[in-house]
Amino acid sequence: MDALDTFLQMGGHAKFVWPAYGLGVLGLVGILLLSVKSWKAREAEFAKLKAASLPQTGNDGATS
């Protein structure tokens, strides 16, 4: 248990190291969330473009 406490203290620099790790993780999570949001928006946009470019069929199956 003493080894864990020594590690967590980071040689007396824990008050600088752990917040830096926290900010790093927070930044990475933020980038991940923005990327997923953008990906879903582009996916929806692509689906609209794909639907608009396909030939439209009527009830009888003929293209118009």
Image (cartoon, grey):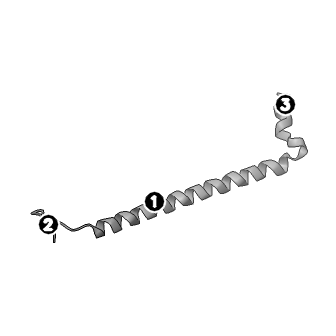
Q: Amino acid at mark 1?
A: Lys
Q: Residue at x 82, y 39 (%)?
A: 8
User: In terms of secondary structure, where does tag 2 sit?
Assistant: loop
Query: Which one is in front, 11 or 60?
Result: 60
Secondary structure type for disc 1: helix
Q: Which label sits in the foreground, 1 or 2?
A: 2
Q: Residue at x 56, y 56 (%)?
A: 33
Residue 24 placement (x, y as % from top left)? 71, 54
Helix, strand or loop status at disc 3: helix
Report the amino acid beneath label 3. Ala
Task: Please identify the residue farthest to the left as the structure is shown.
Answer: 60
Give the CA separation, mark 1 to mark 2: 30 Å
The image shows residue 44, relative to residue 5, as above or below, that is: below
Which numbered marker is on residue 58?
A: 2
Q: Foreground residue, 53 or 42?
A: 53
Q: Position of residue 42 (x, y in %)?
A: 45, 64
Quadrant assignment for the N terminus: top right
Task: Name the mark on residue 3.
Answer: 3
Q: Residue 3: give x, y in percent of width and height.
A: 84, 30
Q: What's the mark number on residue 28?
A: none
Q: Considering only order in the chain, which callout, 2 or 1, is on the residue closer to the N terminus?
A: 1
The percent coordinates of residue 5 (x first, y second) are 84, 34
Q: Residue at x 83, y 37 (%)?
A: 7
Please tell me how many numbered marks the rendered image carries.
Answer: 3
